Amino acid sequence: MGEEHSGVWVFSERKELMLELLGKGREIADKLNLELVALLLGYNAKEEAEELVKYGADKVLLVENSMFERMHVEPYLNAVYNLAFHYKPEIILIGSTRRGKELASRLAAKLGVGAVSDAFKIEVNEEGKLVLTRIVYSGNAVATEICETKPKIVTVPPRTFEKLEPTERKGQIVQVEVKVEEPKTEIVEIRPIEVSRTPIEEAKVIVCGGRGIQSKDDFKMLEELAQLLGGQVGNTRPIAEDRKWFTEWVGLSGKKVKPKLYIGCGISGMIQHVAGMRDSKIVVAINKDPEAPIFQVADYIIVEDLYKVVPALIETLRKTLS
Amino acid sequence: MRVLVCLKQVVDVTQIRVDSSTGQLILSGIPRKISDFDKNALEEAVKIKEKFGGEVVAVTVTSEDAKSTLREALAIGADKAYMIYDSALENSDITVTTFVLAEAIKKLGNFDLILCGEATIDGYSGQVGPRLAEILGIPVITYARKIEIENGSVTVERSLEDSTEVVRSKTPVLITVVREINEPRIPSLMAIMKASKKELNVWSLEDLGIPKEKVGLQGSVIKILEVKAPKVERKGIKIEGETPEEIADKLVKALMQEGVIGR
């Protein structure tokens, strides 16, 4: 593609993630002297558009269509593709939700360009190139990559970058009409997953249970510990998938967490799990097995039966914190 | 039903070691296997064949010999396997791999269903499935945890972060699956023996009419600057004591000093 490409675009169907992308996008746009553009696909979304300007956008491309009331990738893809084809951005940051990842991959194929998935670090190097860092080999390694197409597409996981403080600043809101085709797939039903508590990604303290926990009932003990610490309970993938005690898990393929305190109980520390908790500030690991790999990523190592240590810990905390 | 499954041969990530002086990964000599979620895709394809009849074709694009991996796929229940094998494919990025895969599929003819894993355990980009569908011009449903088939249409439960979405599509359709969809079978000795007689075809780039310049490093748009083990900087302090109470006491004190608990 020989034409002029310009501008950093950001898009996510999730507002919070969109604001985080604007935060990082602002930094990149300033370094490369480019315009920061937010894509807003919605319905009656004028007010939201103004908010995006406050969070850093120079321009908001607003496409309003009742089809955007819920996120169905096809119409979204239609719109983003048409806009990208017409306006030719240089960089497109897309929020890495499962829907967002599908959107990014399909967009990349339609535009015939490269895409980098789940970048947790984005830097501009001396040559003005975007250097992207991501996890590979299920958490065994990190790769730094450069994408040589224009535009280049990068997906960014939630809670990776900080949003800016909103300020009164000038920005342009441009309403655009885009023809949206009838989708080939039909959404028959959406069943929300009930969440009775705050998302685990937001917990300041996480007490996590692994295969060393013998019954689902024993999670009550971890729950008690978590409550004393003002935190939440988490678990590993085998607990969710093999034993089917829970539907979520902490890990590369599940929730990525970074609490200030993570306490792993009976967790061996498979690399896929570690990749989901590695950014925790302080890591405590309790496991009978002195060879458990979790100890290699722990600040405090307790080689002991969790069924002895956790009750003692609960007792001590009760006394200390009361 | 004619079902195609895209498989990738990957290194067993649990066996990767790191050269501690350089931080480089040691990948040579590590056993290879079918990437986890691709195996779920294969299992699902075989289940569909067992229910509706038809054929399961497994295909892989690889720069190293993947015959034994494909033999495993045949033992699990694929009827035929195609290995698109060329050493020139080494260092190809997703754009290239997907392009080659698409060319192979075009040559293999029409399929009712194409199944892929949600991502591979090495690259974990999750791009191949959706990209492939886009190139082939067929609908795609990602992150499937349940697939039902009826009269030329599929109804799929997708596993999303905040919801389960039920999506319907006509065939042909490409579906990417998550691990929850099934438990891949371990092939019996009989199945393994039978697999050795099944058709395993090897195609080169030339067979697909793809020039070597379009693949490998020179055909790729993603350049990898570095792959390294992540730096772990942890204190690694062992907390020991005569009794659990003593351990608990020491830990609580330490955590309070860290400022992560208490007031």
Image (tube, coloured by chain):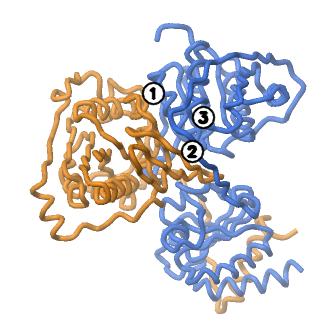
**Spot occupied by residue A271 in the image (x, y as percentages of width and height):** 48, 60
Q: Is B5 above or below relative to B101?
A: below
Q: Chain of mark 2?
A: A
Ranked by sequence position, the earlier of labels 1 and 2 is: 2
Foreground residue, A161 or B175? B175
Residue at far left of view? B197
Residue at far top of view? A3
The amino acid type found where label 1 is placed reads Ala
Image-quadrant location for residue B127: top left
Crowding near the residue tagged with mark 2, few <14, some 14–19, many ≥20 C-alpha atoms within 10 Å: some
Ranked by sequence position, the earlier of labels 2 and 3 is: 2
Q: CA distance from mark 1 to mark 2?
A: 17 Å
Per the image, label 2 sits on a secondary structure element best described as: helix
- What residue is pinned by disc 2? A98
- Letter of the chain in blue: A
- The structure residue drawn at horizontal position 26% and vertical position 50%, both measured from the top left corner, is B56
Q: Given this view, does label 2 or label 3 mark the residue nearer the observer?
A: 2
